[in-house]
Amino acid sequence: MKKLTRMKLINWHRFNNCTIEFGDSTLLSGENGAGKSTLLDAIQFVIICSTGYFNKAAHENGKRRLTGYIRCKTGKENQPYERTGEISAHVALEFYEESKDKYFIIGAVVDSASEGQETTVRYLMENTRISDDLFLYGNQVKSIAEFRGSNIDIRQWCKTNVEARRMVTARLGRIEDKFFRLIPKALAFKPIDDIKDFVYSYVLDEKEVNIDVLRENVRTYQDMERTLDNVKKRMKKLKKIQELYQRVQERIEKDRMYEYFLKRSELELVEGQLSSLETARKNEEIRLSQAKAQLEMLQKERSEKQEIATNIRVELRHNQEFVALEEEKKELKRLRDKRQEAMNEETELKKSVAQAARDCESLLRTIEAGNTSRYSAAVSTEMSQSANAENGTGADFASCIREYRKKLQTLDGDINVTEIKSLTDDVIHFKQMRYGELQEEQAQLKIRLNQNQTEWEKLSKKINKLKRKKLTYPSGVELLVESVQEEFAGIGREIQPGVLCEMLEIKDEEWRNAVEGYLNTQRFYVLVEPENFDIALGIYDRLRREKKVYGVGLINTKDLEKYDTAPAGTLAEVVTSQNKYARQYSNMLLGKVQMCERYEDLKKYSVSITKGCMRYQNCVASAIKPEVFRVPFIGKNAFTVQLAQAEEEFQKLSETMENQEKKLSDTKEILGLLSTESDVDIKYRLDVIATLRMLNKSIDKCEENIRKLKENSTLIQKQLQLDELEKMLRGLDYTISSDTEKIGGMRARIQDLVARKQTLLEKQITGKSEVTTLAADAGERLNSWNREYKEALGVRSIEQFQSEYFYKLPSNKRKYNSERCQIAKDNMINAMVEYKTEHDFGAAASLDGFPEFEAVYERLKNSELLDYEEKVQSAHKAAETEFHEQFLAKLQENMKLAQGEFKELNKALKGIDFSSERYEFQFMPSKKYRNYYEMIMDDFNVTQGESLFSGIFHEAHKDVIEELFEQLSVSGDNSAQALDEFTDYRTYMDYDIKIIHNDGTYSYYSKVCEEKSGGETQTPFYVTVAASFVQLYSNNIGGEAAGLVLFDEAFNNMDDERIGGVLEFLRRLPLQLIIAAPPDKIQYIGPAMDEVMLVMTDQKQSYVEEYHNAV
């Protein structure tokens, strides 16, 4: 064993220069404050290379610092430290290495230039023992530099704690770093409250299970599995696209078959029509031949009768009375034709007269009943005035119309045509004059109505916007705001631009008009945050160039902080805003405008205004136009006021437009009454009345002459014979004409049949070509198509077949197929678009793009799927192997070693009584992680060689394996903490201390610890800590190790019997004990110690003396 034999302290608290001897076991005793803990702190300062654990046993929250030890802190306000100035201190530990019979020193040198400014180095000296000359030049303490320069036996010189720790663990037997945790824990005794925490701290070491490779394998496996799943999902989607494509192709193929059906049926229909046309042509030619023969017979008969009639006429022509009769007949015919023309004209005249009479009645009602409407009265007055002005006789328009109406009513009697024509001319003149005037008024009225309509639409839009709480601004303002909003949204800026007036509020309504009027168009300036101004300005400049947006104000809100307060007495004082930039800008604009109650005070200020909007600026007084401030824009109430104003204006405008439309309607009606079309027609047709009277007289005279000439009997007989022949000739002419027309119709029908046949022949050629092409394209399917065609045609006519398959709704089979095809095509395209979006695929989502989708599917199915399945299997195997060999096996090994340590500890405790009690450490599967414990300790997978993910082992521990794999694959702080727990072998066991009583009964520490006294709870602590140190030193790899254990304030509240039991246990162990305890414990502890040292102080200096009466 490497034993601590002596310690040298120079300038360590009150130990100015002290050397302490240590035995195999040493008791340091003394009153509180004498320096027991100070000595233990000195030892741990050197061997654990830290200052963070000073005085932890004396005070759990102890705050001793290295400065306090080096400068000897007093706690006095006027003199906090005994040592001042530049100070050097030494703590040196001398060890004896029994196996080699030689000494070495591990020590620390501290230089302190001032309070809190300490420099520490640690060193190792071989084959050297402690002596004053190592540390002193006479009475002068050596500094770090002096110490190193004067000692050639220094083997290692460590300026950092890391280097020092490596040196300590190596020289004390190449022990584990756990040493640096156990020493402070042994000094800082705590009652055992949590058995598991105690075991973690003092019994079982944390043993790292490196799962980086395992985690990487698990992640690789899961990544590969996810990739494989993704491949399968892609294949599933591509398979769906392929199926939809096949459906589309099937429907397209069916459509081709229907096209074949249609063309074939059309061809057959054409061929049937050709046959029918040929039959009809032949029949028509037979009927034509028969009609021609009949016509020849009629023509021959007519010729014969015509010859007889001609002979009679020749005979009659030599008769003067007959000639005179013929002339009279011709004259009668001429007069009757002329009379018919006159009667037709008389009919038109009567129509015009009736229309003119109705217009007169309406005009007279309009003129005479002027109270019907204000506008009609105005029209009648204006028409009368116009008539009076134009008529030199003084007759007004109304009397003229009345006279005109009266004359029209007497046209059937004796009339003076000249008088009526003159009156008609007057009427036409009056109407044309007023018609022109009313047309001009109508045009002006339409212009005003259109203008009002435009204003009405603007008001309607404005009202709708106001109801949505949106004000209407100049177009440039709205365009700029919309453009900035779009740009901000595109770059992820949440703060949106605003219009200044919407951000302001007016506190005093009496000054609203002044604020609104003074700001004027400045109310519509656009405001953005300072950091957004440059972006908004760039947008504004683009709008200026591209859309000619001018005159819109864009506020730069930077550097407006100086306007945060509104100057007293100014317009800014009555304006506020929740937006600091809007408030600052309004303060800047309105803070220079002084409010004046009287206009006489305006000139007292450079810029001022009254409530009545009289403004004074630049030495000029001016009144702001009410139009500027009539419509309010500032504040949240601006919406309400504007809405009320707009609705009122809208109502007034609607009433005005209604009156204008009524006026326009009246004007249109009167313009119709002022039409002169009937009057002009009457004027030019009046002469027909006299003409008709004269023609009637002439016809009567002519008929009388004919009657007298017909009284000759011979002439009458010849005439009757001639009349009969002419009647027969007229009958024959009619028949011949009718038959000729029939023959012409027959010839036309024959020509039509020939033309239709030619057309059908051309269609037949085209149809045959189309059917042949479709049949060739069908290839092997043609036989199937022909069978289906015959089955579909069945007993139907071709027309019925076509109607059902192609034209009739809703049973149109081709249309149905086309709709199904389109649906399938749409579904396919949607599936393609979805695939393209999810997998960033560049092929076109169309029928033409399908080959690219199909190529990907084939590649995935025939290559990548197999490749990834192989990779998943490989990654799965690697993860399984690593999980077993580097996780389960390591955990099982560590747990078995831990159980062995407990057995060794219990073996050491066996037979030792601690105040009629014996202790036995218990370990068992964790209640929380029992399933994990059983899996880890299950040797089935090792002995059987089966996969962890199949067989009996997997079935038994499936849930646990999956949960562990899930934990291993998760990343993040929380998962790291959970992983630390899952990879710590100690997690899977619960721990307790079995207390065996002399009467054979027992209890468990976890259940009775709260009822135990302080002494009863300390025994397991010392036993376990000692066992932990034995384990630490036994696990060295340097051959011989130290055995140093430090206990401060040891055995407090323990009775002598328990102290004896603990000491008996400790003396059995290969440890060197250094125990600090108060003087009242010397009688119980001293007899078991090799050395008992008394620590004393006189408040200036501390020292140590050997206690000779310890035994």
Image: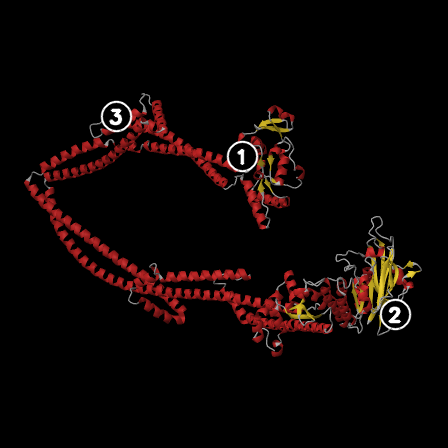
Quadrant including the C terminus: bottom right
Q: In what element is the residue under mark 2?
A: loop
Camera-nearest label, 3 or 2:
2
Q: Residue 523: image x %, image y %?
A: 58, 36
Circles 2 and 1 in contact, beta carbons < 8 Å: no
The disc at residue 419 is: 3
Residue 972 visible, this orientation: no
Camera-nearest label, 1 or 3:
1
Residue at left offset 51%, top offset 35%: 641
Occupied quadrant, residue 762 = bottom left
| Mark 2, residue position | 127
Q: Residue 600: image x %, image y %?
A: 61, 23
Question: How dense is the environment of label 2, judged by Cα within 10 Å: few (below 14), some, or many (20 and up)?
Answer: few
* Relative depth, front residue between 319 and 688: 688
Occupied quadrant, residue 661 = top left
Q: Earlier in the sequence, mark 3 or mark 2?
A: 2
* Relative depth, front residue between 665 and 982: 982
Camera-nearest label, 2 or 1:
2
Q: Amino acid at mark 1?
A: Pro
Residue 1066 visible, this orientation: yes
Q: Amino acid at mark 2?
A: Asn
The disc at residue 607 is: none
Way the structure is coloured: secondary structure
Q: Is residue 550 left or right of residue 811?
A: right
Separation (CA) of disc 3 from disc 2: 165 Å
The disc at residue 632 is: 1
Separation (CA) of disc 1 from disc 3: 71 Å
